[in-house]
Amino acid sequence: MKSILAAISFCFIVFQLQAQKAFHVFPKDHPTIKGSKLGDGSLKNPWDLQTALNQKSEVVNGGDTIWLHGGIYSGRFTSKLQSTIPNKNIIVTSYKGEWAIINGNVPGPNVATLSVVGRNVTYRDFEISPINLKVRDEKVAGFRPFGGVSHNSGKNCKFINLIIHGNNGLGFGSWNKTGGTMISNCIVYDNGYVGKSIKGLGEGFYVQNDSDTEIRVLKNNIIFNNYYKGIEVWSANKKANREYVKNITLDNNVIFNSGLVSGRTVDNIIVATNDRNGINIAKNITVTSNILYHNTNYLQNEVNGDAPSLTIGYYKNAPVENIFIKNNLILGRNNPFRLLHLKSAEISNNIVYGGYIHMLSITANRLKPESLDSNTYFTKNGTPFMIDKKKYQFDNWRFTFKQDLNSQQKSIKQFDLPSVLDISKNDYKDHNYRVVLFSKNENDIIVDFSNYDIAENSNYVIRDVENLDVELKTGTVKNDSKIVFPMKLERNESKSLNNFGVYIIEFKPQLLIEEKEGFFKRLFKWLF
């Protein structure tokens, strides 16, 4: 009997191993183990990166993992991987305890460091950034353009915990034939360059979707200091013949100081199209619980200079339809929140700081009553709404257009926020949290983690997202679970002011010293 059961157990284990295979990738120039197109994906005979990304589903399929071992992978790569197994993605990720960096600062035909044309693949936990990039100006000899990720085709992919920065172009292009894609917990910054006639080119994200049934989701990302806008839900095509900017969700992202590195402040988010045919209209867009910030001196009630954080609509023939804008923090200076060409919306429970809220009269007259409701506006002027070029007092705005009847307008002198704006657990990395803080007076902030099940005596490391390579602070969790975060940091002129900070804190619980039975011992102990 025992032999039969042992045989069954053995077959089960073999089936599991066959069902979920692991493959290994090393850089071609690795000092000890070199990846090769002649490899078989084993640890002893690994693939190079492009060979791994070329594999057909007969070799690598859903549930399998492609491990990227630590090192620098130089090149412009295209992933053709695709899973044919329902609800099981192929996983491409750095090997445990190691870190892979993909360097696109080399000659190549691709516009991006990593181009993706496959489907049902999860890319996670690696970095896309150039090595030894010196020229960021298109006018300077030696300039080489290339972006981070270009997801060209293939549905239901996931991009998780990627760090994409410093590329001479767009950080992440998520194009219209890629419905169902989720991009989560990525850090995307300092992408773009100075153009020949334009101060800054290169967004953090450029997002489209043509699917009627599959939602595109960007959530929990940190996006900052790119040369152009933070997120563009957008199409520049003036002569579209179909819809492909729809069914997109932006949730719980932190986006700040877009354009600052190129010497100007531009939209942290824009939702619109430039279609003159009135066919490709941005619609069914959800913008919820995002934190949008531009450098602003709140102690001096600063609002000077154009610093938009959220713009909806662009061209009159393509007014945005069915957009939900809720629970966002929209901080800018002049024109922080612009409602231009817009047909239908629900805009509620947002906090806005700035000079004027700018709106076109065609939109103000088109929106249904109470499309705007329960918002709070901190503005410098007693006439906070600018409709075309006409200024409206808040009550006049409310009763003339039947909007914001339950909202309130306050002087920017009254502006303040809770010191802890957000604590978000990283669902894909154990004991890892994003913390967003605000201090009008730039004072250090005490953060209480008692509701997050952090064990006493756990060690922690805090990193400022604007200086990820440096451990800003280390320590041990006390019995009250409170940790002090420093706000006054040394940052250069293209970084955020000390009234605002985004941090990553990682906890390392003390392991109990006890013998734990391994999987095979637990499985077979009854056989002996």
Image (tube, rainbow, N blue to C red):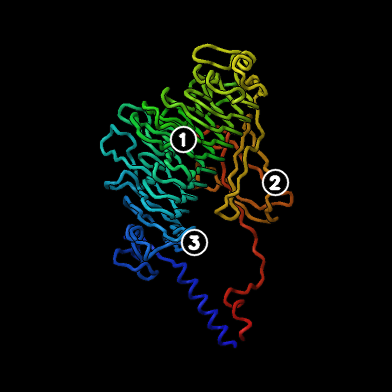
Task: Tell me the CA gap for discs 3 and 1.
Answer: 31 Å
Q: Assign a secondary structure to mark 3.
A: loop
Q: Which mark is residue 482?
A: 2
**Mark 3 / mark 2, whichever is N-terminal:** 3
Q: Nearer the viewer, mark 1 or mark 2?
A: 1
x 45%, y 32%: residue: 282
Can you give x and y, in whole percent of width and height, for residue 199 in the image?
Answer: 37, 28
Q: Position of residue 180 (x, y in %)?
A: 47, 47
Residue type at the position of mark 3: Lys
User: Which of 320/504 is in front?
Assistant: 320
Comparing 299 with 253, the one in front is 253
User: What quarter of the picture does the N terminus occupy?
Assistant: bottom right
Q: Amino acid at mark 1?
A: Gly
Label for residue 357? none
Mark 1 surroundings within 10 Å by alpha-carbon count, few (fewer than 14), some (14 through 19), many (20 or more): many
Name the residue tied to disc 3.
96
Residue denoted by label 1: 230
Which residue is at the far right? Answer: 480
In this rendering, is residue 248 above or below 13? above
Q: Secondary structure at mark 2?
A: strand
Q: Would you say residue 29 is visible in this rendering?
A: no
Q: CA distance from mark 3 to mark 2?
A: 30 Å
Mark 1 in CB contact with mark 2 (< 8 angstroms): no
- Pointer 3 local density, CA inside 10 Å: few below 14, some 14–19, many at least 20: few
Q: Residue 384 location, x and y as percent?
A: 58, 17
- Identify whether 360 is placed above or below 169: above
Relative side of 457 to 200, left or right: right
The mark nearer the N terminus, 3 or 1, is 3
